[in-house]
Image (cartoon, rainbow, N blue to C red):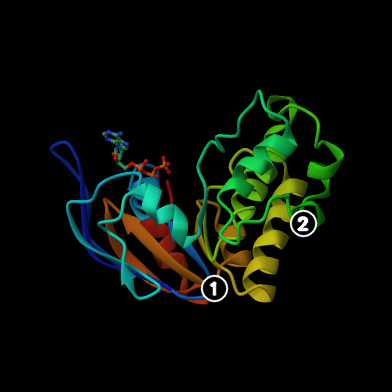
Amino acid sequence: MIQIDKLNQFYGQSHTLWNLTLEIKKGRCTCLMGRNGVGKTTLSKAIMGLLPIQSGELIYDGKDISKLSAHNRAGIAIGYVPQGREIFSQLTVKENLEIGVLSNRNKIKQVPEKIYDLFPVLKDMANRKGGDLSGGQQQQLAIGRALCIDPKFLILDEPSEGIQPNIVAQIGDVIDYLTKEEEMTVMLVEQKLPFARKHGDDFYVIDRGAVVANGEISQLSDEIVKQHLSV
Ligand SMILES: Nc1ncnc2c1ncn2[C@@H]1O[C@H](COP(=O)(O)OP(=O)(O)OP(=O)(O)O)[C@@H](O)[C@H]1O
C-alpha cells in the first residue's frame, strides 16, 4: 500500500529522517514506534504532504506521491488523526464531522451512520461543542472525522496518549474492525507496548530518524524494546 524508500527530511539544517525505508502493507495495522523525538510525527506529516522532504520516494498504491502538495494528496484518501487531535473546539461534534465529509472521496453529503455506530458517544453529543468533550471523546471525534473521508489508509498519531483505559479499549476495537473487517490500512504511531502488541500486525522501530528494527508484531522482542524503546 505504501512504500517509502530512502526518505530524507530536514528542518532547516537539522537532518531529521535518514534514508528511511519502510513498507506498510494493505489491510494491516503497522505500528511506528520509538522514543520521543525520533521522527515519528515528522514521518506522518511527510506522508500527508504537510512537510517537504529532501529526497526519497513515497509510493502510495503504486504511484509516487512525494511531489504532490498536501492539497493534491487529499484526493487519494489518506485519513490523518494528528497528535493533539486538532478538533475545532467552537464547532459542534456534528460540524466537526461534516468537515471530514467535505473531503469524502465518494462526495457524500451526510455524516455516514457508520461513524455513529463505531462511536455512539458522538451521536449522543452531536450538538455539543467539540471543546466540551473529554480528551477521550475528542480523540474519538478526531478519528470519526478522519473516517468521514472514507480513507483507504489511516494514520493515527498516538491515539491512546493521555486517554482513559475504557476509551483506549474502544479505539483499539475500532482499529481491529477497520483492518480486519474493512481491509483498511492503518499506520499507528504508538509508544504503549501493550496497545501496539494487541492491535498491531507489523512494527517498525525508529531511532534518531532511521529504522532500526522491523517485523511482524510477534517479533517485537524484549531485546528490541530494551535497546530502542525503554526510557
Ligand atoms: N517544526 C520543527 N522545527 C524544527 N525541528 C523540529 C520541528 N518539529 C520537530 N522537530 C524536531 O525533529 C525531531 C523529530 O520530532 P518528531 O516530533 O517527529 O518526533 P516524534 O518521534 O514524533 O516524537 P514524540 O513521540 O515526542 O511526538 C525532534 O528532534 C524534534 O525536536
Closer-to-camera residue (46/198): 46
Label 2 element class: helix
Closer-to-camera residue (95/80): 95
Instruction: Specify whether residue 13 is in view.
Output: yes
Sort mark 1 into few (<14), some (14-19) or many (20+) by Cα contacts within 10 Å.
many
Instruction: Specify whether residue 45 is in view.
Output: no
- Decide which of tag 2 and tag 1 comes sooner along the chain: 1
Q: Is residue 19 above or below residue 116?
A: below
| Amino acid identity at mark 2 | Leu
Q: Residue at x 70, y 39 (%)?
A: 136
Residue 213, x across and y down, in percent: 35, 68
Q: Is residue 121 above or below residue 20?
A: above
- Quadrant where the N terminus sits is bottom left
Q: Residue at x 61, y 58 (%)?
A: 195
**Circle on res. 118:** 2
Q: Quadrant location of ligand 1?
A: top left
**Circle on res. 28:** 1
Residue 198 lies left or right of residue 26; in this view the side is right
Q: Residue at x 60, y 62 (%)?
A: 106
Q: Of all residues shown, which one is farthest toward the left?
A: 13
| Amino acid identity at mark 1 | Arg
* Separation of residues labelled 2 and 1 (CA atoms): 19 Å
Sort mark 2 into few (<14), some (14-19) or many (20+) by Cα contacts within 10 Å.
some
Q: Residue at x 27, y 52 (%)?
A: 209
Q: Is residue 82 above or below residue 115?
A: above
Residue 89, x across and y down, in percent: 64, 26
Q: Marks 1 and 2: in contact by CB < 8 Å?
A: no
Does the beta carbon at disc 1 come under 8 Å from ligand 1?
Answer: no
**Where is residue 206, by image quadrant?**
bottom left
Does the beta carbon at disc 2 come under 8 Å from ligand 1?
Answer: no
